[in-house]
Image (cartoon, rainbow, N blue to C red):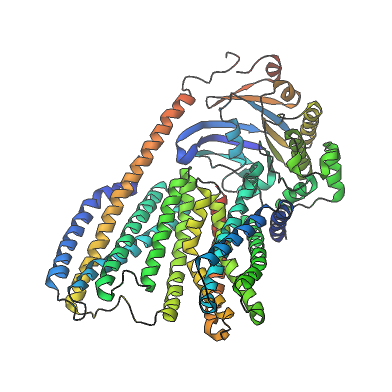
Amino acid sequence: MIAIRGLALGKSHGHYRVFQDLSFEVAAGECYALFGPNGAGKTTLLRVLATLYRPSNGRFEIMGHDGVAEKDVVRAALLLLAHGSYLYDELDAEENLRFALALRGLAPTDRQIKLVLDRTAIGAFADLKVRFYSAGMKKRLAIAKAMLIRPQVLLMDEPYTSLDEAGMRLMNQYIRDIVKEGAAVLMTTHDRLRSAEVAQRVGVLDKGRLSHITVDELASHAVF
Amino acid sequence: MPFFRVIRWVAWKDLVSEIRSRETISSMFFFALIVILVFSFSFSMDQEAARELIAGIIWVAFAFTGIIGLGKSFAAELQNDCLEHLQISPAPKGAVYLGKLAANLLFMLVVEVILFPMFVIFFNLDVVEELPLLLLIFALATLGLSTVGTLFSAMTVHIRAREVMLPILLLPLAVPVMIAAVEATRGALNGLPLSLYGNWLQLLAVFDVVFTVLSFWAFEWIIDS
Amino acid sequence: MISAMIKWMQRYEGWVGGGAAACLIVGLYLGLVASPPDYYQGEVVRIMYVHVPLAQTAMLAYSVLFGGSLWYLWKRDPVVDNMCHAAAGLSAFFTAGALITGSIWAKPTWNTWWTWDARLVSFAVMFLILAGYLMLRTFVDDPEREARYAAVLAIIGFADLPIVHFSVEWWRTLHQPLSISMRGVSMSGEILRPLIIMGIGFSAIFAYMLMVRTQMLYLRRLLIAKKGRLLSQAHLSTAGSGSPSGT
């Protein structure tokens, strides 16, 4: 799970405050959808949790491990699906998957690779170098990577962008599956309809403050 | 052991990407060729002068060519935010450094091995007996440039004036490597007994060890937050 | 909340500056006026009283930079980083001074503007490393990253300088058999005394300038922080959270 207490992030030695005094939790087996206007700091929050930035105040825990003091443990437990696809253009799908997993000390079998490539319907693109992939295809490959890694905590930054209908259904099905297996999922999104299908809790980050709304409210009207 | 697997995979990834795109090695090779040509026009050399100067020319060409390769090493990680991926991955950063170092070292050595015959041809050098020794000198000196070069490549990839900062930072630090490489190469090319220039090889070895260790340690500070 | 180190600097800078001035006045008099000219080099040798302390202080400044860089990586104190930045600039300044005075000394003495003396070359490399350090600081955008990178560079550079010195020394024995060396002056009490006083004076001047410049950089950082805070106040409203459902 993700536990956040009094988190503040100032960029550069604590100057421009992106948010201050943020506190909330995402339990195991729960999907939390975070909304907010552009520039509110949603992406920045995810990047702090992914240990990319150091918070200037407060602390957070991933699976009970402190995000700053126990960075390596935290990094092994979580997976960030961000805007950048983290793929190498000259490698094909399988090579990219194997590389990403090798960085985590994992070695998937050929069967496992084939399985996830089929499930994410990469299909004919599997043998092509990633440089020829569309943005949506790269997203699918990212889902395939997540399926192989099976993280306990999944952070997703606008997961639905670039995906087609089938892709979005695939994404939601994947989220439902891992939530059932006990993972904690935190996603930032602007897609109310799609996220309402999978989220158990919804938050809105605006002007540095977090407020909560129910999933029904989410589905019925605009959040901010 | 996950540590060594990471090294192998990082090196493999760089090598395969390069083989498929052929972008780095070809630009390094042609740049070096141009350097050789410019030098051969700049000095009108007889056999006597050639033997004195050629070692220096070789290493100037190798150093500047190497800098191109070193710069591209981490510039390649900027695609699709891959550098960020390396940062947040649980892989030990030291292993990532060693993998990058291995790939950079290999690229530079390949270019040097292809270029050296050109030097032999253009400047009419007599090298056959000394070849293994020359290769050893190349390897030691190239390692010296690559250790700090890989670290500085990671350091400068984020910043403005990236392409010019790498040589500005690297070359002053690499002065011992350059001096030693030139002296050792000149000794070998002139057929001098090893005892006369063996100390330069020792210097290179010491430099390599010290700066591999230092860069290995420092890499974590550079790539992590 | 002003840093403790800054307060300490504010308190003592006057004393250090005053002491430095006193040392320099005494030293300059003893060196440039009262001490005897050298048997071989004549009056020109007096430049040694400036050149040697400059060189010593340049090395002292780099040592401060090295120690400060280690300290910064350990404690991540931004004020220490300010001090490192200041020390680097001062070290570059003193190094340039040592090189220039060395050159001025060399010309009348050995009829050459530059000698490939191991120490001069090491100083030249040191200057280049420091120039690279200062350039790096200018080009990095994020202050935290800038501090980290600079610290690493300073440490690596420091480790390199002895090796540079060695390699140039070996090279020199191969190619310059003439014994041109900066150590060509016999030391007697009358020469040593002003040299030591000048050494202390220059070190004190460095300490004083370090204190002043560190405070300057510190104030600049505070100013930027204040500006950032003002900007983010517009972003983070203090009057409620603007909840969408009108609660």
The quarter of the picture where the C terminus of chain A appears is top right
Q: Position of residue A49 (x, y in %)?
A: 61, 39
Q: Is residue C107 visible?
A: yes
Q: Position of residue A192 (x, y in %)?
A: 70, 21
Q: Position of residue C105 (x, y in %)?
A: 26, 70
Which residue is pictured at 82% across the width and 38% down the height? A122
Q: Residue extending furthest left?
A: C34
Number of numbered discs on residues: 0
Which residue is pictured at 82% across the width and 28% down the height? A166
Which residue is pictured at 18% across the width and 58% down the height? C21
Along the line of sight, which residue is nearer the eye, C68 or A98?
A98
Which corner quadrant of the image does residue C219 belong to? top left
Q: Is residue A138 above or below residue B87?
A: above
Tell whether B172 sits left or right of B118. left
Which corner quadrant of the image does residue B115 belong to? bottom right
Tell whether C122 sits left or right of C241. left
Q: Is residue B94 visible?
A: no
Along the line of sight, which residue is nearer the eye, B113 or B222?
B113
The quarter of the picture where the N terminus of chain A appears is top right
Along the line of sight, which residue is nearer the eye, A150 or B124?
B124
Which residue is pictured at 28% across the width and 57% down the height? C207
Q: Position of residue B85 (x, y in %)?
A: 65, 45
